[in-house]
Image (cartoon, helix red, strand yellow):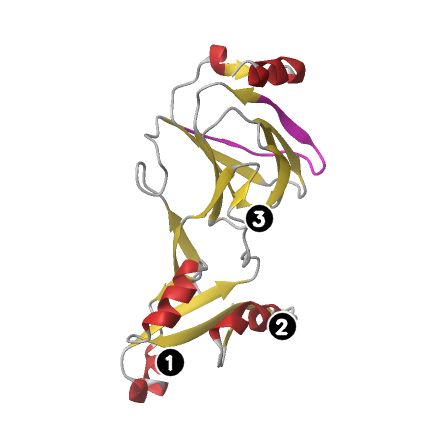
Amino acid sequence: MTTKELKIINPSSITEEINKSFEDPALECVFWCVPGNDSDSLIFYEKNGFHRVVDISADILKDHADRGDLVWFAALRGDQLALPESVAGCKVIRLQTIATLDSGELTFFEENSDVPFDIKRMYYISKVPEGKRRGFHAHKDLKQLLFCPYGRILLTLENETGREEIELSDPSVGVIIEIPTWREMTWLQKDSVLCVAASEFYSADDYIRDYDAFKAYLSQR
């Protein structure tokens, strides 16, 4: 993996600096450090979902030894750097992620903490051809977290707040659906994977598979 250390003067320029760096097709990761006592910068980076880095090499640490206590962050090619707070009223979240230079990222979540419900079931959809559309249903009571650990999937959501789309292409980005929501998923890349964490066991009675029936269901709520 080709990496590059960013020299950042103004934290607010971080997205621009990262995007500019990734114009180099060989670059896969950029990283930077913040003084451990710079609380404003730390809050800024963590609020905007940048991932802390572990296992910084001894050579890098030696080069920065005179700067005292440092906190390291990184962005990998493909990270979604700017996220909406919600899509069709459903919360968009960054899952907890730990980056390791030259070794990728580890992403995880916990029930009733990162995800606001008990998780009773996990499933995923894979081996889908590019351009294929799936979904076309809603749930009455089921709560879900949807995320894409590999590839690119366009998620279209519709409920009483409206109809909106979001592309899922960053494994650390998820969408939480807690209200009856019609969903359609379009595979933008062959073999992309859609993972779902669900609040309940499978129940056929919880599904609404007809769009007109879904609209009628919303009007009766």
For residue 99, what is the image quadrant? Answer: bottom left
Q: Nearer the viewer, residue 173 or 4?
A: 173
Where does residue 135 sit, x and y in percent of width and height?
A: 61, 26
Residue 2 visible (yes or no): no
Find numbered disc 2 in the image and state the secondary structure of the residue it sits on.
helix
The correct choice, above or below, for 1 with respect to 135 in the image is below
Question: Is the residue under label 1 in contact with that under label 3 (CB below 8 Å)?
Answer: no
Q: Residues within 10 Å of mark 2 (few under 14, many from 20)?
A: few
Q: Name which of mark 2 and mark 1 comes first in the sequence.
A: 2
Query: Image point 31% across, 41% down: which residue?
Result: 113
Find numbered disc 3 in the image and state the secondary structure of the residue it sits on.
loop
Asked whether, in this view, residue 29 is left or right of residue 153, the answer is: left
For residue 219, what is the image quadrant? Answer: top right
Specify the amino acid type for callout 3.
Answer: Ser
Find numbered disc 1 in the image and state the secondary structure of the residue it sits on.
helix
Q: Nearer the viewer, residue 74 or 55?
A: 74
Q: Residues within 10 Å of mark 1 (few under 14, many from 20)?
A: few
Where does residue 148 sit, x and y in percent of width and height?
A: 53, 42
* Residues in magenta, as a range: 122-137
| Numbered disc in front, either 3 or 1 | 3
The correct choice, above or below, for 92 with respect to 56 in the image is above
The circle on residue 20 is: 2
Query: Image point 39% across, 19% down: which residue?
Result: 201
Specify the amino acid type for callout 2.
Answer: Lys
